[in-house]
Amino acid sequence: MTLPLAAIERAARKAGASRISAKATKELQKALNDISLHLAVEAGRAARHAKRKTVLASDIRLVAGKK
């Protein structure tokens, strides 16, 4: 599942970009998809390590490096 381009463009504008090209939006979409897939895989590993089948928010925070 990928984020809609409109949502990515909105996020870029919130981050301070006054304009963002269509190519840049698509590249950001690809990068965010890769990052989210990596986080999901690692969170799944963390859940299995804890002998659980369910991925918790704490697993996501753990692999994302947040408290």
Image (cartoon, helix red, strand yellow):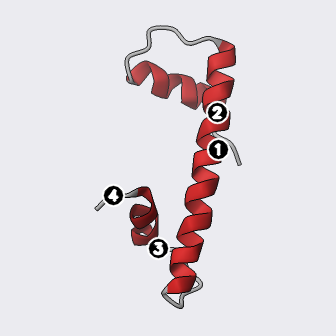
Q: CA distance from mark 4 to mark 2?
A: 22 Å
Reading the image, the residue beneath label 1 is: 33
Which residue has dot 4 on it?
Answer: 66
Name the disc covering residue 29, or none.
2
Decide which of tag 3 and tag 4 comes sooner along the chain: 3
User: Residue 58 appears in which quarter of the rendering?
Assistant: bottom left
- How many dots with numbers? 4
Residue 29's spot in the image, x, y percent?
64, 33
- Asked if labels 4 and 3 touch by Cβ distance under 8 angstroms, the answer is no
The front one of 48 and 53 is: 48
**Which secondary structure, mark 4?**
loop
User: How far across and down, in percent of the image, does residue 18 sit?
Assistant: 44, 8
- Residue at the spot 52% in from the left edge and 85% down from the top edge: 49
Is residue 8 placed above or below 1 in the rendered structure?
above
Q: Please give the name of the residue rendered at 59% of the width and 62% of the height, measured from the top-left corner.
A: 40
Q: What's the residue type where badge 4 is placed? A: Lys
Q: Secondary structure at mark 3?
A: loop
Please tell me whether mark 2 sits on a helix, a strand or a loop.
Answer: helix
Query: Residue shown at 63%/39% (left/top)?
Result: 3
Q: Amino acid at mark 1?
A: Asn
Residue identified by numbered label 3: 56
Judge the density around disc 4: few (<14), some (14-19), many (≥20) Cα neighbours within 10 Å: few
Residue nearest the viewer, comparing 63 with 56? 63
> Where does the image place residue 66, in percent across and percent down from the top left?
33, 57
